[in-house]
Image (cartoon, rainbow, N blue to C red):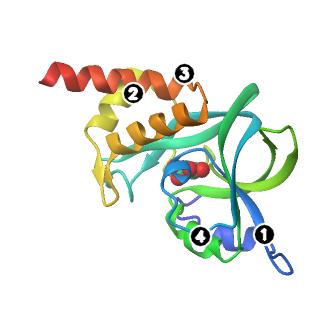
Amino acid sequence: MSADTIAHNRKRFDFSGVDSIWLFGYGSLIYKVDFPFLEKRPATIHGWQRRFWQGSHDHRGTPEAPGRVVTLIENPDARCKGMAYRVSPKVFEHLDVREKNGYLRFTTKMTFDDGSHAEGLVYIATEDNEAFLGHAPEADIARQIAGANGPSGPNSEYLLRLAESLRTLGDACPHTFAIETHLRSATESDT
Ligand code: SIN
């Protein structure tokens, strides 16, 4: 599948008659909220794990030197905490452009902190998209992130802001924190 998913996403979900819908964010959508929302609540999804396995050619890297950003990978034993936003369907006109480098919208069941559930939409970059990079050792991922920069800023900023947000949310994501540790020690040994 082509990495540009705008047209795919526009065909995926019929918003007619829908006033508001939940969106689940697990990456930059947790901390970079450049869209209006009606309500915001921490939520968890089950059966998915966060991984820095998606290439970023448009935000945190370039086509020549892609960065790495997160996607979700299926794992029946995993859970992923993030932030849910109740939004107007209009918001997806903006978000489909922001998330165009390989992400498709899927529906998912979300569990809020009080145990109640709702259905929401989540952007996932599946492994058949052209920008998918896949598994690499966490130290190598940290090195790639340390060297990548794109129109939205340094890839390291994406990682560090996400790690900080996950601490605030109480999501102990060993993968994100391991890459953060590698990045910080590489930066310290450079100084
Ligand atoms: C998300 O945050 O939910 C999707 C991935 C990203 O934009 O970082």
Q: Tag 4's secondary structure?
A: loop
Residue corresponding to mark 1:
13
How crowded pointer 3 is (Cα within 10 Å; few <14, some 14-19, many 20+) is rated as few
Residue corresponding to mark 4:
36
Q: CA distance from mark 2 to mark 3?
A: 10 Å
**Image quadrant containing the N terminus:** bottom right
Asked whether mark 3 and ligand 1 are closer than 8 Å, the reply comes as no
In this view of the protein, which residue sits in the foreground, 2 or 106? 106
Q: Residue furthest left?
A: 191
Residue corresponding to mark 3:
174
Q: CA distance from mark 1 to mark 2?
A: 36 Å
Name above or below for residue 102 compared with residue 93: above
Name the amino acid type tagged 1: Phe
> Are the residues flagged by discs 2 and 4 in contact, CB closer than 8 Å?
no
Residue 107, given in percent of the width and then of the height, sits at 79, 54
Which of disc 4 and disc 2 is earlier in sequence?
Answer: 4
Q: Going by the image, does 51 lie left or right of 179?
A: right
> Are the residues flagged by discs 1 and 2 in contact, CB closer than 8 Å?
no
> Are the residues flagged by discs 1 and 4 in contact, CB closer than 8 Å?
no
Name above or below for residue 142 compared with residue 4: above
Q: Tag 1's secondary structure?
A: loop
Name the amino acid type tagged 3: Pro
Q: Tag 2's secondary structure?
A: helix
Which of disc 4 and disc 3 is earlier in sequence?
Answer: 4
Which of disc 1 and disc 3 is earlier in sequence?
Answer: 1
Asked if one can make out residue 129 in the rendered structure from this viewpoint, the answer is: no
Which of disc 3 and disc 2 is earlier in sequence?
Answer: 3
